[in-house]
Amino acid sequence: MKTCLVVDDSKVIRKVARHILETLNFSVSEAGDGREALDSCMASAPDVILLDWNMPVMSGMDFLRALRDSNVASRPKVVFCTTENGMGHIRAAIEAGADEYVMKPFDRETLESKLQIVGLA
Amino acid sequence: MLTPTAPRRGAINVFAALLEQRTGQQIAANREWLVETALKPLMRARGLASLDALVAALVGGAEPALAEQVVDALLNQETSFFRDAGVLDMVADAVKSISDESAISRRPRIWSAACSTGQEPLSLAMALDERQVRAEIIATDVSEAALVRARAGRFSQFEIQRGLPVRRMVSWFESDGGDWVASPDLVRRIQFRRLNLVGDPLPFGRFDVILCRNVLLYLSPSLRRTVLDRLALSLRPGGLLVLGAGETVIGQTEAFRPSARWRGLYEPSLAHPIPLGRLAR
Ligand SMILES: C[S@@+](CC[C@H](N)C(=O)[O-])C[C@H]1O[C@@H](n2cnc3c(N)ncnc32)[C@H](O)[C@@H]1O
């Protein structure tokens, strides 16, 4: 089973994402901020990370840079999933090593389509 | 699900007949219930309270544009960028090899024959640009409303996120008040025109690739065959036909055979000349 780590400080978003991902046959784990997510990846790296931008403790961007600098063995795909929908943010995310970008609000089809693009659905 | 009561049934039959007469599209029995939903916005805009009132307005004939609006509303225009992952990239590879192998230098000619709101030809134009291939792309649809949207190249946040990789999005689109607008340079590579596959003369000249995806599905088998046979005549020898993921020519016509080289694509079969009688419409 493919694995996905959902990183978002909103419990509701995590719940919605989990629900959609489970119908797409993912095994889902959750983290409430970048720090937690990094710990989780060190313990065991998922296939893909769905990543919010603005979070307390450690933002999505800081997490992504730390992840790409870290020695996490496999290279999980990173899909940003955020309300930051401006071109500047999107370009910065790509530059920092994001594989895909989901602009909130999202639905099942959007998520499925983006996971397909990164080769996971 | 509710079964339509007698008067609604009558109305639905009128709309179904109008749609088929204008476009060849038949409404599958399990989609009939969608008719009312599809026509609701039109009814509301005109202050018509029921399907029967809409029929009366249609039959009254005071407004020729109304019939076209009804047909537009009933057409299934579902589409997305790079629909069916991988297919359009393969088509772009095929176009590139046609262009590389052609003895005289000329632009490959491509026809997107039911382009809806433009995602299909725009995807192809992006994929060809990445391969440094300049092609002539003609994109047609029976729906003028769809073509107006296609020419504008403007997509909602939901539409832009269906099938389009983010790198391609930032290369070719600008955000504008919540929508995403294709670069004029990309849109300019495509000629959008109105064309009804059922009955209109086909575009002049022959094509290297024809995409006719997800449109013949709901045509009657005999009409589907007629259209396919006409498309075969519009392809150069060695040209390719691209159908939708669930579609095939097998059992429909002998005018095409599967391409040996490009999986899932079809080429005109020279062995089976098309009886002329069948082409007349
Ligand atoms: C489901 S969409 C498919 C769009 C695109 N080819 C794709 O595969 O995503 C079908 C399109 O066919 C158009 N169409 C239906 N009947 C047609 C006809 N007789 N001639 C030309 N276009 C037609 C509709 O207006 C609609 O835009």
Image (cartoon, coloured by chain):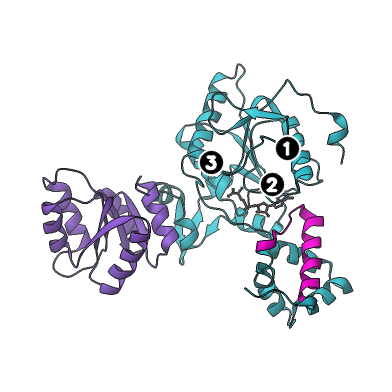
Chain colours: A purple, B cyan
Subunit of label 1: B
State the residue at coordinates (44%, 59%).
A109
Report the magenta residues as a range: B8-30
Residue A83 visible to an observer of this rendering: no
Callouts 1 and 3 on one subunit:
yes
Where in the figure is residue B251, as x and y percent of width and height? 69, 35
Q: Residues within 10 Å of mark 3 (few under 14, many from 20)?
A: many
Q: Is residue A49 magenta?
A: no
User: In the rendered image, which residue does mark 2 sit on?
Assistant: B216
Where in the figure is residue B106, as x and y percent of width and height? 62, 25
Query: Amino acid type of disc 1?
Result: Leu
Where's the N terminus of chain B, which quadrant? bottom right
Q: Residues within 10 Å of mark 2 (few under 14, many from 20)?
A: many
Where in the figure is residue A91, as x and y percent of width and height? 32, 53
Q: Name the main secondary structure of what is drawn in magenta.
A: helix
Q: CA distance from mark 3 to mark 2?
A: 23 Å
Q: Secondary structure at mark 1?
A: helix
State the residue at coordinates (62%, 57%).
B77
Residue B6 visible to an observer of this rendering: yes
Where in the figure is residue B5, as x and y percent of width and height? 75, 77
Determine whether label 1 and label 3 are within 8 Å by CB.
Answer: no
User: In the rendered image, which residue does mark 1 sit on?
Assistant: B228
Q: CA distance from mark 1 to mark 3?
A: 24 Å
Viewer-side residue, A105 vs B257: B257
State the residue at coordinates (81%, 61%).
B17
Subunit of label 2: B
Is ligand 1 less than 8 Å from the beta carbon at label 1? no
